[in-house]
Amino acid sequence: MKRVWKFVLDPNEEIHRIELPQSSDVLGIQPRDGKIMLWVRFESVYEKPYTIERLFRVAMTGQPFADDDLRTYIGTVQFETVEPSNVGDVLGNYPRRGHIAYHVFEETP
Protein backbone atom coordinates (compact mmCIF):
# COMPACT_ATOMS: atom_id res chain seq x y z
CA MET A 1 0.00 0.00 0.00
CA LYS A 2 1.26 3.50 -0.82
CA ARG A 3 0.90 6.83 0.96
CA VAL A 4 1.44 10.44 -0.04
CA TRP A 5 3.18 12.76 2.40
CA LYS A 6 4.02 16.43 2.16
CA PHE A 7 7.23 18.14 3.16
CA VAL A 8 7.72 21.88 3.62
CA LEU A 9 10.44 23.68 1.66
CA ASP A 10 11.14 27.18 2.95
CA PRO A 11 11.72 29.44 -0.08
CA ASN A 12 14.22 31.46 1.97
CA GLU A 13 16.50 28.44 2.26
CA GLU A 14 18.37 27.26 -0.82
CA ILE A 15 19.18 23.68 0.25
CA HIS A 16 16.79 21.16 1.80
CA ARG A 17 17.89 17.70 2.94
CA ILE A 18 15.03 15.25 3.40
CA GLU A 19 15.29 11.62 4.47
CA LEU A 20 12.96 9.54 2.30
CA PRO A 21 12.41 5.85 1.61
CA GLN A 22 14.53 4.62 -1.30
CA SER A 23 11.46 3.74 -3.35
CA SER A 24 9.82 7.17 -2.98
CA ASP A 25 8.55 9.19 -5.95
CA VAL A 26 8.28 12.98 -6.04
CA LEU A 27 4.80 13.85 -7.29
CA GLY A 28 5.17 17.63 -7.48
CA ILE A 29 5.19 20.93 -5.63
CA GLN A 30 2.56 23.54 -4.78
CA PRO A 31 2.52 26.87 -2.92
CA ARG A 32 0.80 27.12 0.45
CA ASP A 33 0.94 29.93 3.04
CA GLY A 34 4.22 31.32 1.73
CA LYS A 35 5.92 27.91 1.76
CA ILE A 36 6.60 25.34 -0.91
CA MET A 37 4.93 21.97 -0.37
CA LEU A 38 6.75 18.94 -1.79
CA TRP A 39 4.46 15.93 -2.30
CA VAL A 40 6.06 12.47 -2.17
CA ARG A 41 4.57 8.98 -2.66
CA PHE A 42 6.06 5.88 -1.04
CA GLU A 43 5.24 2.52 0.51
CA SER A 44 3.35 2.99 3.77
CA VAL A 45 5.63 0.55 5.60
CA TYR A 46 9.37 1.12 5.52
CA GLU A 47 12.28 0.82 7.89
CA LYS A 48 14.99 3.35 8.72
CA PRO A 49 17.85 1.38 7.08
CA TYR A 50 15.98 1.66 3.77
CA THR A 51 15.88 5.45 3.70
CA ILE A 52 18.21 7.82 1.90
CA GLU A 53 18.88 11.52 2.19
CA ARG A 54 17.71 13.43 -0.87
CA LEU A 55 18.81 16.96 -1.63
CA PHE A 56 16.44 19.59 -3.05
CA ARG A 57 17.45 23.11 -4.11
CA VAL A 58 15.23 26.18 -4.36
CA ALA A 59 16.23 28.94 -6.80
CA MET A 60 14.42 32.22 -7.30
CA THR A 61 13.88 33.52 -10.83
CA GLY A 62 17.04 35.37 -11.85
CA GLN A 63 19.15 33.83 -9.09
CA PRO A 64 22.41 32.36 -10.44
CA PHE A 65 23.11 28.71 -9.73
CA ALA A 66 25.35 26.02 -11.18
CA ASP A 67 23.68 24.38 -14.16
CA ASP A 68 24.82 20.81 -14.45
CA ASP A 69 23.44 17.43 -15.41
CA LEU A 70 23.11 16.43 -11.77
CA ARG A 71 19.86 18.35 -11.21
CA THR A 72 16.35 17.23 -12.02
CA TYR A 73 13.70 19.91 -12.41
CA ILE A 74 10.75 19.28 -10.05
CA GLY A 75 8.59 22.34 -10.70
CA THR A 76 7.90 26.05 -10.23
CA VAL A 77 5.64 27.82 -7.74
CA GLN A 78 4.60 31.46 -7.62
CA PHE A 79 3.60 33.64 -4.70
CA GLU A 80 1.81 36.96 -4.97
CA THR A 81 3.68 39.92 -3.55
CA VAL A 82 2.30 43.29 -2.46
CA GLU A 83 4.61 46.29 -2.23
CA PRO A 84 3.86 49.92 -1.40
CA SER A 85 3.78 52.25 -4.38
CA ASN A 86 4.43 55.96 -4.83
CA VAL A 87 1.53 56.10 -7.28
CA GLY A 88 -1.89 56.83 -5.81
CA ASP A 89 -4.75 59.21 -5.64
CA VAL A 90 -5.67 61.86 -3.10
CA LEU A 91 -6.79 59.18 -0.66
CA GLY A 92 -3.43 57.42 -0.56
CA ASN A 93 -1.14 55.04 -2.35
CA TYR A 94 -2.12 51.95 -4.26
CA PRO A 95 -0.05 48.87 -3.54
CA ARG A 96 1.84 47.25 -6.41
CA ARG A 97 1.05 43.61 -6.93
CA GLY A 98 3.40 41.16 -8.52
CA HIS A 99 4.57 37.58 -8.35
CA ILE A 100 7.75 35.93 -7.26
CA ALA A 101 8.64 32.53 -8.68
CA TYR A 102 10.73 29.78 -7.11
CA HIS A 103 12.07 26.77 -9.01
CA VAL A 104 12.79 23.46 -7.28
CA PHE A 105 15.44 21.00 -8.43
CA GLU A 106 16.60 17.68 -7.01
CA GLU A 107 20.26 16.82 -7.04
CA THR A 108 20.70 13.32 -8.42
CA PRO A 109 23.72 11.07 -7.90
Image: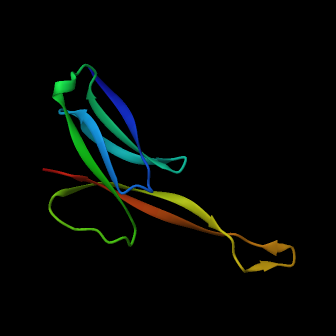
Quadrant in which residue 51 is drawn: top left
Residue name at image x 39 percent, y 39 percent = 7
Q: Is residue 101 above or below residue 6?
A: below
Name the image quarter holding the N terminus.
top left
Residue name at image x 29 percent, y 50 percent = 56
Quadrant in which residue 88 is drawn: bottom right
Q: Position of residue 92 (x, y in %)?
A: 82, 73
Tag count: 0
How has the structure been colored for display? rainbow
Relative to 65, is 60 on the left or the right? right
Residue name at image x 63 percent, y 64 percent = 82
Q: Position of residue 37 (x, y in %)?
A: 42, 44
Q: Position of residue 2 (x, y in %)?
A: 28, 24
Q: Is residue 78 above or below residue 37?
A: below
Q: Is residue 56 above or below residue 23?
A: below
Relative to 17, is 23 on the left or the right? left
Residue name at image x 44 percent, y 50 percent = 10
Q: Position of residue 27 (x, y in %)?
A: 31, 41
Residue found at the very far right of the displayed protein? 90
Quadrant in which residue 62 is drawn: bottom left
Relative to 71, is 10 on the left or the right? right
